Image (cartoon, rainbow, N blue to C red):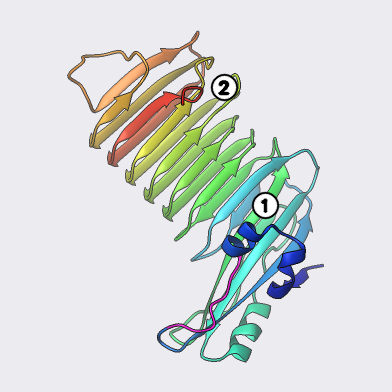
Amino acid sequence: MARIIPFFMLAACFPLAAQENWCSAYSSHTDGMITHAEVREERLAAATENTINPAQNGSIRVHGWTNAGIQVKACIQSTARDESTAEILAKQVTISDGPGRVVAKGPSSNDNSWWSVSYEVWAPAAANLKLEAFNGSIHVEGMAGHIRAHTLNGSVKLKDVGGEVDGETTNGSLSVDLTGNGWHGAALRLNTVNGSIQLHLPSALSAAVEVSTVHGRVQSDFATEGKPEDKNSVKFTLGGGGAKIEAHTVNGSVQHRPADVG
């Protein structure tokens, strides 16, 4: 059963910095609209593929953990002409619809009222994920399953991930930060149209890396293959080679450097 936590009670649950950034409401906007915010938590069983979709406006943050189930923390924000209507609207929003289905649903939005949901989720580290956002960012940390992360307008950040990973955005940046002895899994593929890409890869990593941009520049701290004058597409092999890491952008730069170098 869903558990609703009034926003004023968050001080007992989270550090101050998290309170300020996690789920807040503004008393009013310049156009006179009122925003209500609340945090709701649910525990779900994991599925073969776990879908997380905050609907039109909302971000996703996923952490890997050792537990078998999925823990969901959702920030629901609703806006209306008055506080009572905004609160009622928030209560009509649901944040899941079954095992492995962290999906936000609610009433249709209009000029007088609208809602959004952002998720922070803890999932089994080896779980398969399908992450879909529209106007929001995606951040995944400590996961090593089959991960598909797509947003239209927002950034994608991947930290200490493995498995088979596809990260894609249309208008936003992509970043990958790997530590330890590097990549464990089949492949890592990154694509953006309008945005930069940053790769922080351990020197101990064994992988075949290929990066490119159409309208931009590739900057690398690794020894690369190909002609020195080619600044738009480079390839290089780390360690003994192995899994393929690809990163491509149309309008933006690509930077890659060792993660263990400051």
Amino acid type at mark 1: Val
- Location of residue 189 with respect to 111 vertically, above or below: above
Q: x, y percentage for residue 173?
A: 39, 45
Q: x, y percentage for residue 107?
A: 58, 79
Amino acid type at mark 2: Gly
Q: Is 58 positioned to the left or the right of 214 in the image? A: right
Q: What's the mark number on residue 182?
A: 2
Q: What's the mark number on residue 121?
A: 1
Q: Crowdedness of circle 2 by 10 Å Cα count: few (<14), some, many (20+)?
A: some
Q: CA distance from mark 2 to mark 1?
A: 24 Å
Q: x, y percentage for residue 231?
A: 22, 25
Q: Crowdedness of circle 1 by 10 Å Cα count: few (<14), some, many (20+)?
A: many
Specify the segment rendered in magenta. 23-29
- Location of residue 203 with respect to 139 vertically, above or below: above
Residue ID at (59%, 84%) = 86
* Residue 25 on the magenta span: yes
* Majority secondary structure of magenta residues: loop
* Residue 63 on the magenta span: no
Point out the image quarter for the N terminus.
Answer: bottom right
Q: x, y percentage for residue 260?
A: 51, 22
